Image: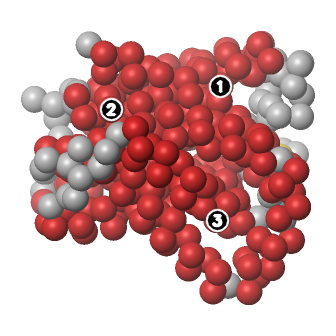
Amino acid sequence: MTWLLFAFIAPAFYGVAEILDNFLSNKIFKHPLTLAFFASMFNLLVVPIFFFFNHPAWPPLSTIPIFLILGFVEFGYLYPYYKGLQNDDTSVVSAFFGLGRIFIPILAFLIVGEVLSLVQYVGIILIISASILLSFKREHTKLLFSKSFWYIGLAAFMLSFEGVLLKYLFEHGVNLSTAIGGEMLIATFFSFFLLFSHKVRHDIVTNRKALKTFFPLFTLEEIITFLAFAAEAYAIDRAPVTIVKAIGMFIPFFILFYGKMLKTRFPRVFKETTTTGVVIKRIVLFLIMVAGILLLGNYD
């Protein structure tokens, strides 16, 4: 049951990483693509170290398309993810990733006609209902959808393929090191296409000083993100991906806990409303989303 420990370590680490991402994307790097580029470049430092301790092996040629998709997902989700963080509290943004749990069965129904059970449909309704209630923001006399709902919905759609495709690689003889390292290196390759944009290039050059100033914090965030990703991948390799991803939905609870404990000490880092009423409301809605996710994973 070692995988269960790693499955819970992942959301605990992701919670810290998302808090740091929120600070970096709101206070330091205002252009999400610049931060996405720097984050992807960091892979060139982390992956060789990871390969030193966990030796990779050449994957089967038939898995190359899977690696390309994973690399694109790993890089592509960063823009809507950072934009989402710029528009809402970290725990709310994290909770919206639960939307990703409904995409695969819906796509399966649309593409191959796969019909879900009644229990799974109930799970989808719970996830959507809780997400909508979380996403409402009051502006003057109107209730509006939070922008982060749409941004994170897109990011969640992309990431919904990651766990399944990683599981596919593991079942086809690809080891943990090769799967993680390959995905990250291909993501870095895709990030170089950003340099074709004059605006992005200019912003990257402009923010070199900021990167140097906050490099220790940026490094800490990237290392924690990598450890969370590695822990989740390890769990997926040894357990059903549905269960591992369901456990991953505890990220908002960790974020609320960190915010409640540390916000007064590090007020600049935390973008989180921690009043008692708001926290209780969010915990209830988070629990409804978790219940929906567990029902969605109840396969016959």
Q: Which residue is mark 1?
A: 255
With respect to residue 143, does 202 lie above or below?
Answer: below
- Nearer-N-terminus badge (3/1): 3
| Amino acid bearing label 1 | Ile
Residue 83 at x, y percent in the picture: 68, 56
Between marks 2 and 1 in the image, the one whose residue lies nearer the viewer: 2
Q: Nearer the viewer, mark 3 or mark 1?
A: 3
Residue positioned 61% across, 29% down in the render: 15
Element carrying mark 3: helix
Residue under numbered circle 3: 37
Judge from the rendering whether residue 193 lies leftward or rightward of residue 159; answer left or right: right
Helix, strand or loop at mark 1:
helix
Mark 2: which amino acid?
Answer: Tyr
Q: Is residue 223 left or right of residue 1?
A: right
Residue 79 visible here: no
> N-terminal of the two: label 2 or label 1?
2
**Residue lying at 84% horizontally and 65% vertically, measured from the top left:** 207
Q: Is residue 199 above or below residue 169?
A: below
Residue 118: quarter of image = top left
Give the residue type that dot 3 points to: Phe
* Residue hosting label 2: 234
Q: Which mark is residue 212?
A: none
The image quadrant that residue 300 belongs to is: top left
Residue 175 % position (x, y): 23, 44
**Sequence-first disc among 3 and 2:** 3
228 w.r.t. 195: above or below: above
Q: Position of residue 201 (x, y in %)?
A: 74, 79
Q: CA distance from mark 3 to mark 2?
A: 26 Å
Q: Residues within 10 Å of mark 1 (few under 14, many from 20)?
A: many
- Residue at the far front in the pictured view: 52
User: Residue at the location (15% across, 61% down)?
Assistant: 60
